[in-house]
Image (tube, rainbow, N blue to C red):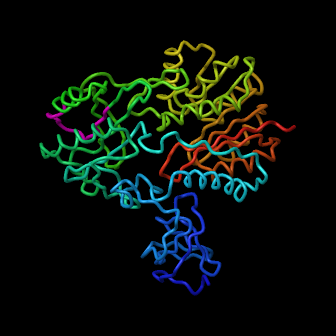
Amino acid sequence: MAMALRKFDEVTVQIQRLAYGGRGVGRVDGFVIFVPDTAPGDVARVRLLKVKRSYGEGQVVAIESPSPLRTTPPCPFFGPCGGCTWQHVPYEIQTQVKESIVRESLEHIGGLKDLPILPILPAPDPWGYRNKMEFTFHQDGSIGLHMRGAFDRIVDVDRCLIQSPLMNAILHEVREFVRERKLPGYDPHAHTGFLRHLVIREGRQTGEALVLLVTSPGEFPQAQELASDLIARHPEIKGVLRGINPSVADAVQLAQVEVLAGRPFIYERITGLTFKIHPDTFFQTNTAQAERLVEVVTTLSELQGRETVVDLYCGVGTFSLALARNASQVFGVEINPAAVEAAWENARLNEIENVEFLAGDARTGLVAIASKGGPPDVLVLDPPRSGAGRRVVRVIAMAGPRRVVYVSCNPTTLASDLKLLVPMGYAIRAVQPIDLFPQTYHVECVVALDRAR
């Protein structure tokens, strides 16, 4: 069947399931076709845009018979906007699919069957959950989110349903200020224009907000007026900043940060700990579920107060500081020097003394700790989306921690790493999926492994 299909052919496909990446999966005479914007049970007329040996990719021409699982997306920008992928699927179905994706990834990629996978922990509120948003200015001065599949185009959104009312109000104020004064946005093709990004951060437990305007270099005479207006209208805003990006890249890259009003950080609290959040601080974007994530990691670590813990990819110390409350000593390893400095600052802020943070990559940091103090009792790792990789997994096995707690935001790379780690002498004790990103296909997962021999 695959040889008979060609690019731009139209076929009728019944969607069987949703896959990691957000697309629906169907078959035509056994040939797999991936189709975005579909739901399990849809019968769709699909135009093929790519035909490979073992699969095809297409786009919906028409939904010939909609699935009973379909729901009407509440956001008027859903579809073109790249912020969400699954608003057309009820939330309870989203979480079921994510749990299945974790299981299928571990089985098919990792070769790991009959695993103790716990029921997924859904978000308490699948709307308004994000504590950080990045919006992009268009060269005409409008502001919005990148169009799905076209990062050089912007969907002009006046509100976003996965951020809070306060953040939407700030977005509105900035939009109107820029529009009234006809301030030019940046053109990533011509490399002209001025306004580039608007970043809004919010401390959900503290009620504090931080606003960052990213611009090209140059004079910004309206900056102080904008900062004053924002704080006057929204006293929750504790700082308004200007970040300068001199590069041509259309990304939030800051060569310099100027405080226009207030302070350059906000506070956030989770699990009784206080964290300082700067514009470029990595912090989980769903505060409520971040708290549950820390609780899961703490529970699966099973600390009794005597253990030595190593936290790889520790960031600003979110897991390190929580685990230190029930451990003898915690070592955090992080390659980003600014994050290490922030982790030390957060330790002092919370008066936690049994932690030590090291700047360096995961492999060299773990080798240094293990060679000095022996095998850690518990090793926690939260690598980037690309996973830890073969070399880090090999060093983990050589270090020989009694227990490993692996936090992942990508079930496919998680499966690949576990496929390497399990044969090195570790047995999977528990798998806990957590939904930190409602309305998207992303899923967090925590896996606890014990040394088997």
Left or right: residue 141 versus residue 207 is left
Q: Please, which residue is most extreme toward the bottom here?
A: 4
Query: In this picture, is 387 found above or below 364?
Result: below
Q: Position of residue 281 (x, y in %)?
A: 44, 32
Query: In this picture, is 393 found above or below 59?
Result: above
Q: Quadrant of the C terminus?
A: top right
Q: Which residues are magenta?
A: 211-223
Left or right: residue 86 versus residue 153 is right
Is residue 216 inside the magenta stretch? yes
> 249 or 37: nearer the eye?
37
Left or right: residue 105 versus residue 5 is right
Q: Please, which residue is most extreme toward the front here?
A: 68
Q: Position of residue 20 (x, y in %)?
A: 57, 57
> 316 or 257: nearer the eye?
316
Residue 31, picture quadrant: bottom right
Residue ID at (52%, 26%): 270
Residue ID at (63%, 33%): 312
Q: Please, which residue is most extreme toward the left here?
A: 181
Residue 147, picture quadrant: bottom left
Residue ID at (31%, 40%): 168
Is residue 288 inside the magenta stretch? no
> 352 or 80: nearer the eye?
80
Q: Position of residue 144 (x, y in %)?
A: 30, 50
Q: Quadrant of the N terminus?
A: bottom right
Residue ID at (77%, 27%): 375
